[in-house]
Image (spheres, grey):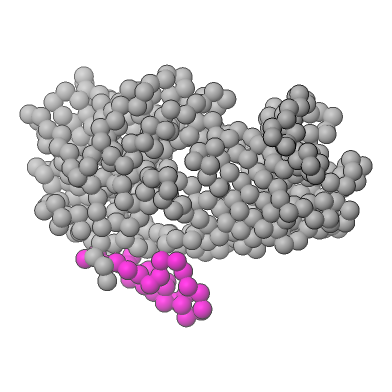
């Protein structure tokens, strides 16, 4: 890359460029061949302060798909402080970290034409560096993190297109992948390097560690034997219904995370003496809605989902979490799964709950919603949210009411407030109008957003 002395004498460098990031697990379908969703990375600058072991990543992002909240298309510039392993997805700081006196080096092995060395840095994080034996240049770095849906998740950063910059060979192409479906998570093209700049941008302070407080679960009775059991973050509500049957409870949605899902299950289990949650309905496979699937499995609770999501959820539950153990790793259980095609009815002497395949929703094809015909209550995820700025799939609620000849009065959504269906349709119409104005304003400025023009009203396709 330019020699050990040259690298060690560097104070800093700044990299700029552009690219795309993987927008988590938000694809239309659970099928592995479904198109993933992406975010634009623009106006990107990453300043590496090598002397102080830190980096500052600044970039503008825009979702390459219609997003329900305005900030998802605002292109505001981020200001992220990175330290430790977070800055070692570039070969220069990775090599310097491997050479640091505080680093513990492991044995070298050969994989194909790559020499691989594992090493542990001062904070205890372990990663591997792969050196191309033909060029003697770093080809990749690899590390493992804990993921709420995927357990131990291996990330690989790939370095290609090396060119000399002020006596140092640096990559012009950066790619990152994960060991789930070999998914690419970053595609980045470098358009400049500057070494030993006189003035780095101001670095933010180290953020406070994330709070480990228990989720704030709020229970509200909606009807006899039907409760909204939601996690509140300030005024923000996310969660779903819990329904009482003769000898058990059913919960809608393993939303958010292990902590949120287990807190909602525990709150539900305190509602009726002698009755516990035995089944959880998952509306769809997106990571926010299905973030607690592994937690559900850890309790031996049966998951009810669309048939096309089964393989995905079985894959999630089968993944190991050895380095970052979660509830499922501590109490291993196989996934108990009930598959739904068009509809499923859960019924006993106390209650009838109907579960349907959601149609008319181009945000999610493998989705379910639920309906209590006696109570006239519908339960859904991502049909509506009264807090959204825009609704790009506004016809979904009415389309499913019409298709299955339902007569709901109350909507218990995963996101936003519990309201009447009439109020939801009125608010959704406002969100459609907001989206139409937003698209028109963008078009007038010469910018064309993916998803514009708006294609759906509350009554269906426009």
- Locate residue 215: give its quadrant: top left
Percent of width and height locating residue 84: 70, 37
- Report the front residue among 279 and 2: 2
State the residue at coordinates (84%, 55%).
164
The reply, left or right, for residue 106 in relation to residue 210 is right
Percent of width and height locating residue 306: 28, 41
State the residue at coordinates (29%, 66%).
456
Q: Is residue 129 above or below residue 320?
A: below
Residue 234 in view (yes/no)? no
- Locate residue 199: give its quadrant: bottom right
State the residue at coordinates (51%, 78%).
446
Q: Quadrant of the C terminus?
A: bottom left
Instruction: Indicate whether residue 453 is drawn in magenta.
Output: yes
- Report the front residue among 130 and 214: 130
Residue 461 in view (yes/no)? yes
Q: Is residue 170 above or below residue 389?
A: above
The reply, left or right, for residue 140 in relation to residue 155 is right
Percent of width and height locating residue 142: 66, 36
- Report the front residue among 13 and 77: 13
Percent of width and height locating residue 309: 33, 40
- Locate residue 249: give its quadrant: top left
Q: Is residue 241 above or below residue 187?
A: above
Instruction: Indicate whether residue 263 is drawn in magenta.
Output: no
- As drawn, which residue projects farthest toward the right? 5
The reply, left or right, for residue 34 in relation to residue 304 is right
Q: Which residues are magenta?
A: 430-459
């Amino acid at each position: 890359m330019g020699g050990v002395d040259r690298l060690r004498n560097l104070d800093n460098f700044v990299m700029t460029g552009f690219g795309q990031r993987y927008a988590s697990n938000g694809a239309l379908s659970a099928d592995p061949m479904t198109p993933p969703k992406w975010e634009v990375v623009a106006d990107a600058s990453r300043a590496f302060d090598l002397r102080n072991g830190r980096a500052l990543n600044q970039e503008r992002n825009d979702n390459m798909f219609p997003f329900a909240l305005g900030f998802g298309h605002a292109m505001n510039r981020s200001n992220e402080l990175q330290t430790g392993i977070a800055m070692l997805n570039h070969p220069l700081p990775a090599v310097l970290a491997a050479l640091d006196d505080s680093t513990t080096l492991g044995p070298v092995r050969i994989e194909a034409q790559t020499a691989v060395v594992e090493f542990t840095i001062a904070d205890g994080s372990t990663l591997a560096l792969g050196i191309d034996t033909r060029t003697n240049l770093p080809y990749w770095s690899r590390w493992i993190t804990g993921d709420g849906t995927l357990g131990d998740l291996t990330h690989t950063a790939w370095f290609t297109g090396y060119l000399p910059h002020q006596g140092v060979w640096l990559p012009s192409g950066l790619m990152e992948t994960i060991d789930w479906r070999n998914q690419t998570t970053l595609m980045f093209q470098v358009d400049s390097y500057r070494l030993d700049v006189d003035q780095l941008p101001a670095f933010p302070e180290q953020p406070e560690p994330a709070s480990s407080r228990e989720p704030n679960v709020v229970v509200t009775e909606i009807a006899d034997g039907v409760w909204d059991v939601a996690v509140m973050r300030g005024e923000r509500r996310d969660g779903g219904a819990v329904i009482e049957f003769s000898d058990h409870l059913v919960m809608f949605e393993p939303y958010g995370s292990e902590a949120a899902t287990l807190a909602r299950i525990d709150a539900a289990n305190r509602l009726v003496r002698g009755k516990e949650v035995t089944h959880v309905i998952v509306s769809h496979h997106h990571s926010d809605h299905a973030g607690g699937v592994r937690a559900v499995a850890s309790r031996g609770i049966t998951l009810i989902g669309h048939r096309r999501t089964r393989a995905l959820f079985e894959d999630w539950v089968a993944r190991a979490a050895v380095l970052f153990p979660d509830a499922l790793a501590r109490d291993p259980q196989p996934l108990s799964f009930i598959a739904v095609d068009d509809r499923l009815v859960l019924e006993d002497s106390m209650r009838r709950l109907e579960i349907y395949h959601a149609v008319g929703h181009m945000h999610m094809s493998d989705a379910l919603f639920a309906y209590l015909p006696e109570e006239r209550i519908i339960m859904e995820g991502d049909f509506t949210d009264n807090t959204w700025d825009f609704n790009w799939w506004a016809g979904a609620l009415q389309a499913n009411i019409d298709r299955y000849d339902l007569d709901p009065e109350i909507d218990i959504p995963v996101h936003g407030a519990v309201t009447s269906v009439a109020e939801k349709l009125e608010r959704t119409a406002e969100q459609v109008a907001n989206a139409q104005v937003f698209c028109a304003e963008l078009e007038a400025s010469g910018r064309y957003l993916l998803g514009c023009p708006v294609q759906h009203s509350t009554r269906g396709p426009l």
